Amino acid sequence: MTERINIGVAGAGVFGGHHCGKIAGREDAALSGVYDIDHDRALLQARKHNVPAEKNFADLLERADAVIIAAPAIAHYELALEALRAGRHVFVEKPVALSLEEADELIALSMTRGLILQVGHQERYVAEAAGLFDRKRAPVKVDCVRHTAATGRCEDVSVVLDLMIHDIDLIRKLTGAEIESVSARGENHAAEAELMLDNGSTVSLAASRRAGTPERRMTLVYDDGIIEFDFVNRKAANTTPSPLHACFDGEDAPLSFRDPLAFGTEIFVTAIREGKTPSVTGADGRQALQWALSIEEAAGIGASYDQQYKTPERRRA
């Protein structure tokens, strides 16, 4: 494929707006349209980029080779399923779906149709560029904290599927292990979990979207040292023998550090153009979802949360 790839965006909220900007700024892709159940919101983004604001998702698909789904999580599965059935490549924000059965259906359909299914776990790009995945050993202990203030966004799912799932994805990639046991507590806006993995590693996770002070950090304890990341203040410390590439700022910093969202867009476009597997696949999204659902179940949260989002109108927002 040599011509520009037409990409539509479903969901015209804050994150959808960011995605529109990233696509519109590329030379090898074109923003073909915007869809949102709130048509006025879609119009705002569409006018900004001089593209159509579609009243129906099917109309968005007609104009597109691929779609980015940045709607509320409750709508991810339905929109991704419709897009894949229409033969469109899909970049869906995390979580990939709300059940393993839904995720499996999306993965199977993308494979059968030969389509890209990429999931928006953007933190993965930062960790990879930093060299965390180059280590040949797994951390023996992981401690993660992810706190944000209330924004009202993404509250159709629990904080586990909204925030904690970022750290879950990183831990799965870093350890290559499975959960042996899980203990969790909390409520839909704040939760904590302790995991024992089958390789002997222990994991502590804390997430809140009602915190007064933003905090996003990860501490990795290895048998030969400690690596610490402070994602809010963009700092890193390392006492292991392995080099850590953590130049977050400046023109020399890789795009994955400076703008992970734009880097994810680049991966999506390249995967479509060159037929490559994206670095965060539907299967990766499914694995992170599996852990997240196990934590939700252990904490007794999530599944029945906020039934207003179960209506068809909210599911397609």
Image (cartoon, rainbow, N blue to C red):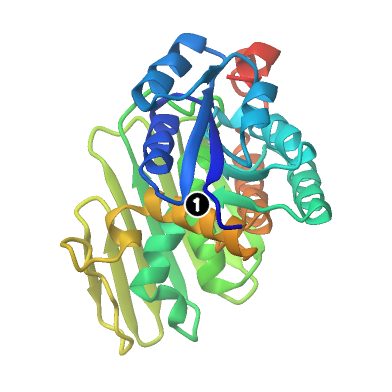
In the picture as drawn, the residue positioned furthest to the right comes out as 112
Left or right of 285? Residue 133 is left
Q: Amino acid at mark 1?
A: His
Q: Nearer the viewer, residue 69 or 185?
A: 69
Q: Quadrant of the C terminus?
A: top right
* Residue in the picture at 31% in, 73% down: 227
Residue 235 drawn above or below residue 295: below
Q: Which residue is mark 1?
A: 121
Which of 247/145 is in front?
Answer: 247
Picture coordinates of residue 71 (x, y %)?
54, 28
Could you tell me which residue is drawn at 40 percent across and 80 percent down?
Answer: 222
Circle 1 sits in a helix, a strand or a loop, which is it? loop
Q: Is residue 123 above or below residue 83?
A: below
Q: Position of residue 218 (x, y in %)?
A: 35, 61
Residue at x 52%, y 12% (from the top left corner): 38
Q: Residues within 10 Å of mark 1 (few under 14, many from 20)?
A: many
